Amino acid sequence: MAANRQSVLAYPAFRHVVFWVFAFLLLTLIYGTAYNSYSLGITIIVMLLPVHVTYFYILSGWILPRFFSRGKYVQAIIAVLVVMICVACLYRLFEIFISNPYILHWYTKRNVKLNWPQMDESRWQQFLEPLDFANALERSNVVVWIGVTLKFISLWYERRQAATQAELNFLKNQLHPHFLFNSLNNLYAFALDNSPRTPEIILGLSNILRYMLYECNAEKVSLKKDLDILHDYIKLEQLRYEERLELNFNIKGDVNGQQIAPLLMLPLVENAFKHGAGETIGVPWINIDVLVNDRELIFKVSNSKPDCNTADSRRHFSKIGLSNVQKRLVLLYPARHRFNIYNEEELFITELKLELYETSKPVA
């Protein structure tokens, strides 16, 4: 149901209908109270609503995209002022020729005496009345500028979303060549030794790259699928280390029916292999723990550290993979994640906690 509501609200036509229904109700309240008759108020609104509609779409459909969105702010202000005066004149003409005579007739028919001396003047004199023109200027702008303000908010939100999506795409695209570069280095080492496992590595690598290129364009992917790809990557790395690596990969909890942003876990494991196990003399070790508790994911990777000085150990922090994950988490899971890095004397730990998405269920 929530997905259906979001899809309906995504249609611009529906949002416009909602706005004009709101505008009609607001004007009904204002005019109905002023005339002490909601039936009269509704009739007058129907007469004057075309002016409001025309005014709004000139501002939102012409002036904003033609001048304001292009940074032509002076031209935009001049255009708004010109249109504002023209609309106020149009509003006065509607009042003089349509709504005011109808109001006078409505009250006269009900034997209500009105003290309305302006109606005895000529239409030209009515049009030149400064106080009535000021009132027309005010009435024609009340609802329209509520709509324009909402339009500004909508444009700001769309631009912000577009900028966020562009940054996410950049970070994701940055991750692909980084992973490919590291994987090709491993493949090159096997090819030099004429290893019979080279075809197996190429097949596993192609499976991971297929996932990256074709399935990771989605905003969310299946947690199980992301873990399967992670498992495929670990198998590729284990081929390189053979018996020299101690690795534990534990999954606890139900991973079915959960969704996650793609490729958040893989860089953490890749970092452990490349800058932990790959640089450790002796027998390196890596522990990978996945815990799914209801809608929370806890993903923890710990690995042995090479014997090096403190300055060299800081490379863990500065690599593309980890910084990439940190930036993506800020954009994708604001206030819904924790990402901690522990650089201890003999081990390096990354721990990710985030709130998972629930798989969307089809509506019957």
Image (tube, rainbow, N blue to C red):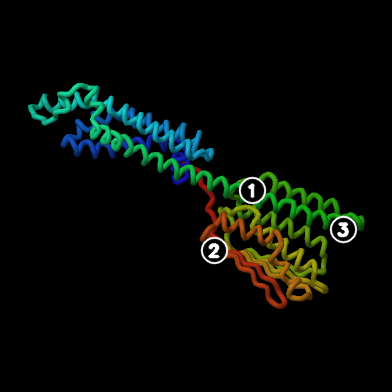
Q: Name which of mark 3 and mark 2 comes first in the sequence.
A: 3
Residue type indicated by callout 2: Asn
Q: Is residue 295 above or below residue 151?
A: below
In the rendered structure, the answer to whether residue 251 lies left or right of residue 294 reads right
Q: Position of residue 15 (x, y in %)?
A: 41, 38
Mark 1 neighbour density, 10 Å: few (under 14) some (14–19) many (20 or more)? some
What residue is disc 2 on?
293
**Dot 2: few (<14), some (14–19), or many (≥20) neighbours within 10 Å?**
some
Q: Nearer the viewer, mark 3 or mark 2?
A: 3
The image shows residue 132 at horizontal and vertical percentages of: 24, 32
Cα–Cα span, label 3 and label 1: 31 Å
Marks 3 and 2 in Cβ contact (< 8 Å): no
* Picture quadrant where residue 58 is located: top left
Residue found at x 71% / y 74%: 347
Q: Which residue is mark 1?
A: 169
Sooner in the amino-acid sequence: mark 3 or mark 1:
1
**Where is mark 3, residue-wise?**
189
Instruction: Give the image location of residue 223, x and y in percent.
Output: 61, 55
Q: 136 and 33: which one is in front?
A: 136
Near-viewer residue (264 or 116): 116
Secondary element at tag 1: helix
**Which quadrant holds residue 251?**
bottom right
Question: In the rendered image, which quarter is residue 243 located in?
Answer: bottom right
Identified by mark 1, the residue type is: Asn
- Is any atom of residue 300 visible in this view? yes
For marks 3 and 2, give the CA distance: 40 Å
